[in-house]
Image (cartoon, rainbow, N blue to C red):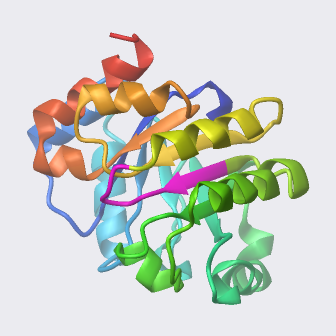
Amino acid sequence: MYDVCEWRHVFKLDPNKEIDDELLERVCESGTDAVVVGGSDGVTLENVLDLMVRIRRYPVPCVLEVSTVEMVTPGFDLYFIPTVLNSTDSNWITGLHFEAMKEYGELMNPDELIIEGYCIANPDCKAAKLTQVRKAPDAEDIAAYARMAGHLFKLPVFYLEYSGAYGDVAAAQKAADILRNTNTVFIYGGGIRTAEQAKEMGDYADVIVVGNAIYDFPEEGLKTVAAVKNRV
């Protein structure tokens, strides 16, 4: 079983986006700690399965971040289950989770499920619109959500998601300070396009997520692995 506590870097690939075999091989053999499959729109069981099968050619851990029940399929090493702490729609906090447990709970291996306490900090991104996050949390809000995740609910993961925009470094630092003496892993994702940005956020977050850069700036995106793991 893979231990997220030991990770420093993951790539997130969107099953609704094209990635050729050569670039996928470089991603999977980059030294990243895991490849997460997930997206906010256009995600189907078919394109999830297709991407999973391609990633499975390599020994890197393969993780599904679940955004709809319909995309869930066996074959992944872990399943990340987001609960959006700052959603205004309770379906994205507990509602969909209840329906999934009611329908599929007996079939699931609890050791493969990891709940993520999400704080979506960019209200203009697709994930925010989907989950009805209607305003940008400020640094104090983010700190409160970090406390909720780490101190109150004692979730295994707090995920600060800026999705397409580079985030507030001071807010990330404050969240890291709050979570330092907890068992909650602090994951940061959003807007990382360079090795320098990866290192900057990696100084505070336990794990950084690189997504769009792999599609838009693949050479820079690949450099983020060494920047976080080797501190160069």
Q: Is residue 199 above or below residue 14?
A: above
Q: Identify the magenta region.
A: 158-166
Q: Is residue 115 left or right of residue 34?
A: right
Residue 158: % across, % down? 66, 50
Quarter of the rendering containing residue 172? top right
In the picture, which quadrant includes the N terminus?
top right
Residue 27: % across, % down? 25, 35
Q: Is residue 9 above or below residue 35?
A: above
Q: Is residue 79 above or below residue 186?
A: below
Q: Is residue 4 a member of the stretch shown in magenta?
A: no
Asked whether 202 or 69 is in front, the reply is 202
Q: Is residue 60 visible?
A: no
Asked whether 51 or 156 is in front, the reply is 156
Quarter of the rendering containing residue 51? bottom left
Residue 169: % across, % down? 47, 40
Q: Is residue 159 a member of the stretch shown in magenta?
A: yes
Residue 93: % across, % down? 70, 77
Q: Is residue 169 left or right of residue 222?
A: right
Identify which residue is drawn at 43% across, 17% down: 229
Q: Is residue 104 visible?
A: yes
Asked whether 88 or 64 is in front, the reply is 88
Q: Is residue 130 left or right of residue 113?
A: left
In the picture, which quadrant includes the C terminus?
top left
Q: Is residue 127 left or right of residue 132?
A: left
